[in-house]
Amino acid sequence: MRKTGKNITQARKSVEDRSYTLQDAVPLLQKVKYAKFDETVEITLRLGVDPKHADQMVRGTVVLPHGLGKSKKVLVIATGDKIREAEAAGADFVGGEEMVDKIQKENWTDFDALIATPDVMKSVGRLGKILGPKGLMPNPKTGTVTFDVGKAVLEVKAGKVEFRTDKTALVHVPVGKISFPPEKLIDNATTVITSVVKAKPTVAKGKYIKSCYLSSTMGPGIMLDTSSIETAAKA
């Protein structure tokens, strides 16, 4: 059996076995920090949906008002003027078929987001086995298959994140760094929760947000008061 370290054990002791408001949870998470690096803070929601059914899949994107604390590396695969548009918007890697070949032949995935124009998706589609498992496959629903590549690049660079339910109906979304001022983490987390609430499938019945936790890379999970966050998200 794996032994729990004394730091995480001590951190967990500081978190009471009850639900917290987001306004109380963020400062507490920062208070019990012990890791020596700038941890990522994440919101995890368990939803009252059955992701086995396509009409209950919850998926979307949201631009965090205060970003993620790091700049994402963006690859754009396009042709003609769209390549120059992507470069002007600040894309880190830009190209056409040669980029498809690089990914396919070298298994290259040294980027955080891939944006493609619709006219190249036939070629990009061949990369599903490589990009799919890493969550990098572009999709029209998330705005990463578009002719407006300049806008798409700027949004990703500004802190656009994707959320989607996994097979256990969980949604994991990063909301910033532990070093952020509390109000920025609260704003980002509230923005994510609001977007997930708005994405509720019309066929979903019963309680939608079954549980919600705030955590950091190395820190403990802090249970959030679902009734207060769902009410705030609908306001």
Image (spheres, helix red, strand yellow):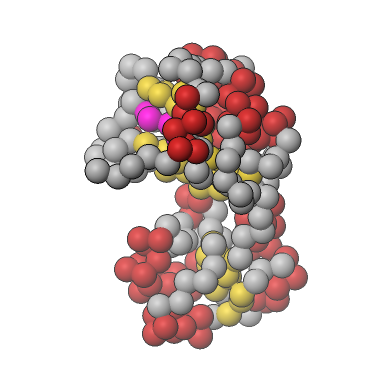
State yes or no: residue 221 in magenta: no
Determine the residue positioned at 54% across, 68% down: 111
Quadrant for the C terminus, please: top right
- Whether residue 161 is visible, yes or no, is yes
Secondary structure mainly formed by the magenta segment: strand
Residue 141 spot, x, y in % from top left: 47, 50
Q: Nearer the viewer, residue 132 or 189?
A: 189
Residue 129 spot, x, y in % from top left: 32, 68
Q: Which residues are magenta?
A: 43-47
Q: Nearer the viewer, residue 15 or 78?
A: 15
Q: Quadrant of residue 234?
A: top right
Q: Is residue 227 left or right of residue 3?
A: right
Q: Residue furthest front?
A: 6
- Whether residue 155 is visible, yes or no, is no
Q: Is residue 38 left or right of residue 15?
A: right
Q: Is residue 1 left or right of residue 101?
A: left
Determine the residue positioned at 66% across, 55% down: 70
Residue 94 spot, x, y in % from top left: 61, 76
